[in-house]
Image (cartoon, helix red, strand yellow):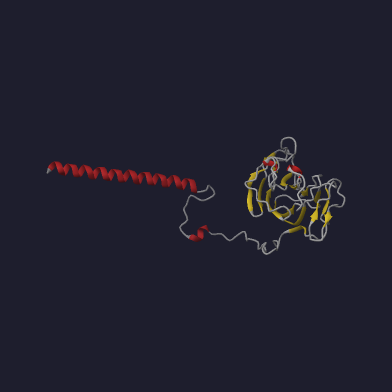
Amino acid sequence: MKKLYIIVILFFIVMVSCKMKVKKEIDSAGEKANDVIVNSEYSEIEPTKPEETEFYEPVVPVVGPATNGKIPSDAIILFDGSNLDGWISAKDSTAAKWHLNPNGSMTVNDKTGNIQTKQNFGSMQLHIEWNSPVEVQREGQNRANSGVFLNGMYEVQVLDNNDNDTYVNGQVASIYKQHVPLAMASVPSGEWNSYDIIYHAPEFNAEGAKIKSGTLTVLHNGVLVQDHVEIKGTTPYIGWPKNPAHGKGPLILQDHRDNSRVSYRNIWIREL
């Protein structure tokens, strides 16, 4: 009987010890979790009332949404199909010489050169729509090739890739020669594609050295194809990316000089 009594006591001691060990491990894990989730900007004193974690400034501006064909109420319209007054030749700053179409679009005028906005922009939200010709001509990089250049130097590729393979860091919706798109989301040739682009410009110090890379997020026909990718520099056809210091710059649309016949419409931006 005495032996049984000793065994019961030992069992009880072991169980209590295990529970204390488990509790200690849980407490330790909890402390580590708290260390991870508490950001350094917060006070070490834990709030005890909900209103202590609520704030009411800055007041958020009200913007009319982009629904049912409308554009945001604070957007800058760069092209609405009525004229090319907001655009000039990127080559010599003369009037833009692209074709203005009755359907509210404009089409690349072969060998007249790139066009650019008269206004300069930095970080932005950009909406732009484009299409390639219904009649398929050429292949590879010579089929409906154009490009959208942010800040005048960072290209999001425009290309008809339907049944038309090319190098993947130069296909449609690539950041040219830098980032391969996550998906190929093109509509059939001749139909209208859309790009919705979030661009954050790079930052440079007083000496002209880059201190923070720019980023690009791209949705192609509503599909995320570039997810906040780092802009490594310019997007040249030949050579490595370069990082010249710059401020705001124009939005440029490319004439690839191959009779691409790419058309654009409904272009607007929101400055960020």
**Residue 67 figure quarter:** bottom right
Examine the rendered structure and indicate whether residue 211 appears above or below residue 195: above
- Residue occupying the point 86% across, 49% down: 93
Q: Work out whether residue 55 can be spotted.
A: yes
Examine the rendered structure and indicate whether residue 160 appears above or below residue 62: above
Is residue 150 shown left or right of residue 24?
right
Spot occupied by residue 86 in the image (x, y as percentages of width and height): 81, 55
The foreground one among 186 and 75 is 186
- Residue occupying the point 44% across, 44% down: 32
Spot occupied by residue 249 in the image (x, y as percentages of width and height): 77, 48
Is residue 16 shown left or right of residue 210?
left
- Residue occupying the point 64% across, 48% down: 225
Residue found farthest to the left: 1
Examine the rendered structure and indicate whether residue 13 appears above or below residue 58: above
Spot occupied by residue 132 in the image (x, y as percentages of width and height): 75, 51
**Residue 48 figure quarter:** bottom left
Q: Work out whether residue 250 can be spotted.
A: no
- Label tally: 0
| Rendered-image quadrant of the N terminus | top left
The foreground one among 7 and 183 is 183
- Residue occupying the point 48% across, 46% down: 36
Spot occupied by residue 187 in the image (x, y as percentages of width and height): 68, 53
